[in-house]
Image (tube, coloured by chain):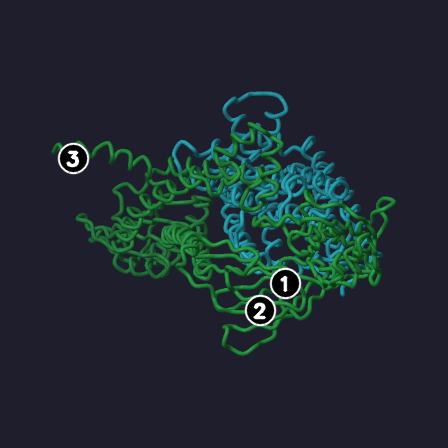
Chain colours: A cyan, B green
Amino acid sequence: MAGIDGSAAHLSDAVFTTAIAVYAVAMVGYTAEYAFGRRGRIAATAPVPARELVGSGGPAQSVPVASAAKPGSSDRIGRFAVALTVLGVLLHATSIAIRGAAVDAVPWSNMYEFASVAGLVGVVAFLGVLWKAPAIRHLGGFVLLPVILMMFLAGTVLYSKAQPLVPALRSYWLAIHVTLVSIAEGALMTSAVLTVLFLVKQHADKRPGGTGRLATLASRLPAAQTLDKVAYRIVAFAFPLYTVAIICGAIWAEAAWGRYWGWDPKETWAFIVWVIYACYLHARATAGWKGRAAAWVNLGGFFSITFNFLIVNIVVSGLHSYAGLS
Amino acid sequence: MSPIGDAWRPVRRAWRRLTSMRTALILLFLLAVAAVPGSLLPQRPLNPDKTSAYLHSHGGWGRFLDAIGMFDVFGSVWFAAIYLLLFVSLVGCLIPRIRVHARAVARKPLPAPRHLDRLPESTSFETSDSAQDYAGTARAALGRRWRIAQREEPSGALTLSAEKGYSRETGNLIFHVALLVSLVLIAVGRLYSYQGSEIVVQGHGFCNVPALLDSWKPGRLAAEGKIKPAPFCIDRMWRFTATYTDSGEPSEFAADVVYRRTVTSSSAKATITVNHPLRLEGDRVYLIGHGFAPRVTIRMPDGSVRHDTEPFVPQDATTLQSEGAFKAQGKPGTNQDVGIAATFSPTPVPQTLQTFTSSAPQVRDPILGIAVYVGNLNYNGLPQSVYSLDTSKLKLTGAANLRIGQTKTLPNGVSVRFDGWVPWASLQVSHDPAQGLLLWSALAMVLGLLGSLGVRRRRLWLRLTPGDDGADGSPTVVSVGGLARSDSGNFSTEFAGLLERVQAAGRPVREVVLSGRE
């Protein structure tokens, strides 16, 4: 039977820690660019009509202005931060791959491993968005901060030693079900970050000429409508994925526990999350619910995901008790 | 308006309100909120022991929660009320939408509005093609994904109305209909389903007869005898194997069985493992738990000898420290029953001076801790747990920790010998006639969802105004307007792309002008 390769597991942990450190430096870079960069000020002083913002494919509107100027030191810092993020992703992926090799199974069977994978999905999603819309580079810190926090939490509180899989998890459905869940939830996290930014931007739009930290942040953000639309597109991508993940979970539950659905706490919360995002999709199509109200529903959905991950795993006991904490 | 119509007005108003999107949205929210207590409070159908413990420790508050169904949320009246209202609201919303969509699919795209330049996206250009020629070219350029209707206006202008993305609403409707079908299938499955379980000691078996199983939980109609359980038999579980890794983690549990599909068919062999149930016609047999059944030889006060093997209940899922009881009845009325309350430690480690617990689930020189009682087992016709003793009429005569082969001798000629152990497995029989169909229905939901969220609905109109008939080479003026009916995303970019395609398809004007000059 599968044993555990102890030295490989240690190597994986070391690479994981290094990845956190690299992300942290990258975050400092993004933040420096955010604080000292010119892009924000230009966007703030030369607003472009909202319709054009939407038309030109989102946040790309201020790029020509910024790149027309001589690339300053903040631009260099920004590029450097992206390079570091890519390096961090490579390290992060390596850490997960080594762990997978060490346990001889897909490495997302407990909370530590799941948090690590979801964090990787989040950063990769950000790099993907960056590819399409380089102008949001200075916002990288807002994505990396939660990822770093989550990885730190994963590496300390949620950490569990590399272990072989218990019999119930020895199924190819583990790879399918959990992969789909982590991709969907990683994407929904990105949507939630954009939704927070949307609320900030919208709040500031209502009070033009405002000062303070939020106003500064808002002046460096893409148009509220763009943020809202991108957040929606991500949910429109993640919701079917999440649905398929739940169905795969049901198929697996039928094979492992004798019923496809049993209101186990994890299943109940998956249902709640699904219903809330269904509410979000409907709210966006209902007069009086568009915009702010729908944005709060989106955040409610992400709150439920977080609750399902942290509280249900740690506090509530159920059949899905694979947290790996003791 | 007739008086009868007036009488129906409030009903119709209520119906309209119930089937509005706003109501559906609120009901959806309520559904999410209502599910929350079901995950935070212990639920009776899932965990009756925890529920009664909670009730016991929470007094009046617990009784209040019980009265409003908080310990069986998903079977409660108010949860059912929410999803039934949602169901009705959905039906009321879907029927007119299906009608409208069917009509939209059947009919030609709408005629072009008079002012195309008032649409969210619009522009115009010129081509040297005649209006008639260009209409054909533009249709070809748009391609098959657009449904196009050509009309001629009184002024002589030609219009093209193009629409695409019908599968968005189709997908939307498929998703919701499949959702309704799924709910019906879940309900049907619950009514006709049953679940039975049996603890099978290695070497024994069972037949799928409800009355003979340890537990049988039927759905409502199954309980009324509307279905006949499949007549299969697991004749013998001839071997149960638990495999552990070097570090002591379990890696595989397997039950090897000999079974017959029906009472009269021939025997077959199968291995049931954790993720691989035995699938029979309509029924599935699962391996859901395992434990140990110690074997003892008891010498009774009257000198007779009894052999007994009893399954013990694991108290700890990781170490499989187990508890159970042996019961041997003496002659009635003599007060000479022997009862043994016992613990089984597979890998024994001392816990206190006199007792042992277990440190691992593997069996390595196990210890059976016994407390032997003599007296009256108190069989009074009521069902009694086989795992524990009713000690109210028994007297403790001695206790010991036995390794395999050891014997404890007690007063009045009683002795107990620990002979060994065999594994037992808990097998579960499940039946749900609707689950296969439900999977298809769920797949239809996903397909519908992909269409509903992935396809974009677009409308495009072209008005081709022919040039002045008299002047040769006078270009055709093409005005274009576009509308995103859903999900406007990057419609401006999309529109620009479309425009480029449509414009490039026609012969440009400039060449004509140049050649005219030459």
Q: Is residue A247 above or below residue A123?
A: below
Mark 2 nearby-residue class (10 Å; few <14, some 14–19, many ≥20):
many
Q: Quadrant of the C terminus of chain B?
A: bottom left
Seen at 79% across and 58% down, the residue is B416
Q: Residue furthest right?
A: B353
Identify residue type, mark 3.
Gly
Residue B123 visible somewhere in the drawing: no
Q: Along the polypeptide, which appears first: circle 1 or circle 2? A: 1
Identify residue type, mark 2.
Ile
Comparing B76 with B262, the one in front is B262
Label disc, if present, on residue B5 of the rendered structure? 3
Question: How far apart are the alpha carbons under marks 2 and 3?
Answer: 65 Å
Q: Residue furthest bottom?
A: B266
Which image quarter: residue B433? Answer: bottom left
Mark 3 nearby-residue class (10 Å; few <14, some 14–19, many ≥20):
few
Image spot of residue B120 (x, y percent): 37, 40
Identify residue type, mark 1.
Val
Label disc, if present, on residue B200 of the rendered structure? 1
Mark 1 nearby-residue class (10 Å; few <14, some 14–19, many ≥20):
many
Question: Relative to B317, is B72 on the left or the right?
Answer: left
